Structure formats: structure tokens, C-alpha cells
Amino acid sequence: MALTDQTVPSDVALNTDLYELTMAQGFWESGLVDAQGCFNVFFRDNPFDGGYAVACGMGQIAELVENLRFDEQSIEYLASVQAPGGGPLFKQGFLDYLRDFSMHVDVWAIPEGDLVFPREPMVRVQGSVIECQLLETALLNLVNFQTLVATKASRVVYAAEGHPVSDFGLRRAQGYDGGLAVARASYIGGCASTSNVLAGKIYGIPVFGTHAHSWVMAFPTELDAFRAFAKSSPKNCCLLLDTYDVHQGIKNAVIVAKEMEAAGERLSAIRIDSGDLAKLSKETRAAFDEAGLPYVKISVSNDLEEYTIQSLFAQGAPIDSFGVGTKLATCDPQPSLGGVYKLSATRANADEPWRPVMKLSEQFYKRTIPGIQSILRFVNASGCPVGDMIVDPDTDTGNRKAMADIIDPVTTHHLRDCEPRELLEHIVSDGVRTKEPDSIECAKERCRDALMHLDPATKRFLNPQTYPVGLEKGLAELRRRLAVEELDN
């Protein structure tokens, strides 16, 4: 199910794990239809052993909420599902409830393209606990993968040092939907274009592509193939050199480039897709420069990722652009962000005050943060972020000078001479979007600006500096007190 303007409600409603529906039925049967919950989406560790993540997928949340309905086909299917012990899994009364169901939740989210760090809420959902549960899986499906891809793309783009990167991952992506998500998120993360034509149509992303090895192999000789492609696509001519032998491919490309010049056209670029890319790109650059063709660009592909690109530049490779496919689309070597959706506060109905709750777990690492959480991002006079403080308005002491570390409560982070800004934006109110989502161009620019202002020590690939995230003093005390109370019980 790809979330686009073509989405139909039945696609969204059943795009969920079965236990969301069995819990919803349990809440309904227990008389908790009016019970309210506050849930937060967060992850526990930065992906790729890095220092940050790029928030992505939030721009599609409002559409998800507005479209989550159960049509008659969905109801009929659920009525047919059998319980393992025998008989229908869902009761008729609950199915009648779903027939008239619509979302009335409120949602706050970090803007797409902004940076996000471990354990802080990327998304906060408040409303009927039934509605919040039915939203969980589809929301995580949107945010988890796209945040992972956008982060991977940002790292690849950072390694490319300003040279264009194109998403070539469609054929290796996890299905039709995965390919669209990769194209969208990688563009927000900094890629310049995509090979995915459908993504270009739906999202307005620039598309890029020329020819494959099969084109060359379909002609009697490589030179014949190059000449034919130059004739067919003189304004989009990038010749692939490594079908047979790169050294001969260079010579043939120079011949065609000269012939194009004589016809008033220009060879745009060549691409190398195998072999020692550093060595071959140097040989190619020298040959074209010697032939008086300095304008011909060099593009490379072949299982590239951030470390390979970084190594190529360290070797002095004169590469102008990169096509990155498999390792971007599959987010190699980390296939999942691990984002979770956890309850942090409850109340009997909308007129009652919130009651903070927390998960203790057998593992200290998995303990959650209670309360209605907001994020304050502190920036210095240069506009660079220096730390994020998680705040609950019900426990807020107003102390903006220091915060307790989110993992180690005895560690304090000081935030002097910095100005805070609220990070979470209210994007859905009572089930309806508060505004039209930002364009992906806006999200892309936000990502570029955020990374430009982030400390290089946090962006480096090897042993990045940990960005400070902490709890406001009142929230830290609430968490400590709830933990003590639960352990005493």
C-alpha cells in the first residue's frame, strides 16, 4: 500500500497487525471506548552507528489519519476471520462499531527533514486509545523505513561532498511500495534525482537514466551502440563504458564525443559500473582532457555507499556524480530503524487529567519516558543545535539551564547562552490535518540546512560525538518516582 493521492480507505484500514484489531475489540468490549491514550514514536539508537537521524514520513501522516476507514469489503473480510479456538474472531457488535469508525486523534510530529535523536518523540499521538492502537502499525510503517532511508541518503550525500547522487535502487527495493518510499525519502535526505519514473510522477522528483549494458550488447560493436545512442538521445547522452573493456570504451566514447561536437551536440557524461573505480576514473579523466573534452562528466555506480565514496575521494578519484542503488534501497548494513510506539499517559475520558505511565521492563535499556512529551531544541548564537530537552508541561519547573541525561540520570547537560525552539508541530487536530503538508522540496531544504548547522563531530562516520538529549528536571524526577513506585509494588 503506497500512501499517495491515489490511496483508498480500505488499503489503509487493513494495513495493520492483527493484534491492533484484537486489542481494539478488547477495549470496546471492556467499556473503554472513551478511554484516552498518549503514544510516542521513538527509536533507541541512531542508525548506522551514526550521530543522528533524518525525520521522514511525517508528511504522509495526515493523509493516513484522514483515510483510515473500514468499508464493507473490509468488514466482510474481518467477519470471515476465524479464531484459533474456533468461531469468528471478531464479534458482530465490534464490526458494527468499525463500520461507523473514523479517526479523531491529535498528532504532533517533528517536521520532515529535521534531525531527530534517540529516545525523543518523533511523533506524539493523543486520542481514544482504540483509535491510537489502530493507527500504530501503519504509522510506524511510514516513519520507520523512510527515516532510515533519509538518514542513509544523507550520509551518502555527505560523503559525496557536493557532487550529485542519484537513487538507483528501485530494482533492489523491497517491492513496489518500497521503491516509492526509497525515492521519496532519499530525495528528502539529499539525493538529486531518482531512476524511479513513477516516483517522479507522484512526487515531482527529478528522474535520471540513460542506457544499460544490454543496449551495447544489442549492437554489432560497442562503437555502433554508442553512435546509435548519441543519435537517439543527444540531449541526454551518458555512455556506459564497462560492457566489454573500459580502456576501449574510453576510446570509443572519445570518438563519439568528437562526432557529437561536429554535429553541434555534446556528450554529457560517461558511466563506469565495475572495476577499480578510482583508477578507471583517473584514466578516463586524463583521456577526455587530452582529447579536449574537459566538459564530459564522469559518473560511477556499482554497489556504492558512504564509505566507498569517501574512499574514492581519498584516492583522488575525479568523479562528478554517483548512482547509488542496492545499499541505499536496502539501507545496508542496517535494514530496520527499530522505531517503537509506546504509551506514556492515560485518562478515563477527555475531561480527566492525564496520568503518566511508564514501561519498566526487565532491561533498563527499554524503560520508557512518562508523560505528555514535547521537545525543546536549544541552538547557539550561530544557529547550531547544542542539545534537545524533553519536557512535560505538567511537571515543568521552568529550568532551561540544565537537563538530566536521557540514559544516565546522574549526568547533567548544561544549556547556557542558548535559545530553545519547540520541535513538535501539531499536524492533525480531531482527525483532520491542520495544514497541507510541506512539499518534499521544503523538507529537502530543511534537511540540508539542519545538517549544515550540525557539529561535524556528530556527522562523522567513525565514532561520532553523541548529541545531548535529556529530560527537564521535573520530568526526570517524575520518571524516577514512577520507577520507584512500580518497583516497590
Image (cartoon, rainbow, N blue to C red):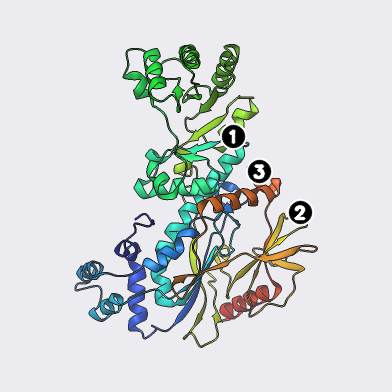
> Whole-Å distance between the Cαs marked 1 and 2?
26 Å
Give the left or right position of residue 240, taking residue 379 as reference. left
Q: Which residue is mark 1?
A: 163
Nearer to us in this view, 339 or 71: 71
Q: Which mark is residue 382?
A: 2
Q: Residue at x 37, y 80 (%)?
A: 27
**Amino acid type indicated by mark 3:** Arg
Nearer to us in this view, 81 or 212: 212
Q: Is residue 438 above or below residue 50?
A: below
Q: Secondary structure at mark 3?
A: loop
Number of callouts: 3
Nearer to us in this view, 381 or 296: 296
- In which quadrant of the rendered view does residue 34 lie? bottom left
Q: Secondary structure at mark 2?
A: loop
Q: Residue at x 33, y 71 (%)?
A: 21
Q: Specify which label sits upstream in the sequence, 1 or 2.
A: 1
Q: Is residue 362 visible?
A: no
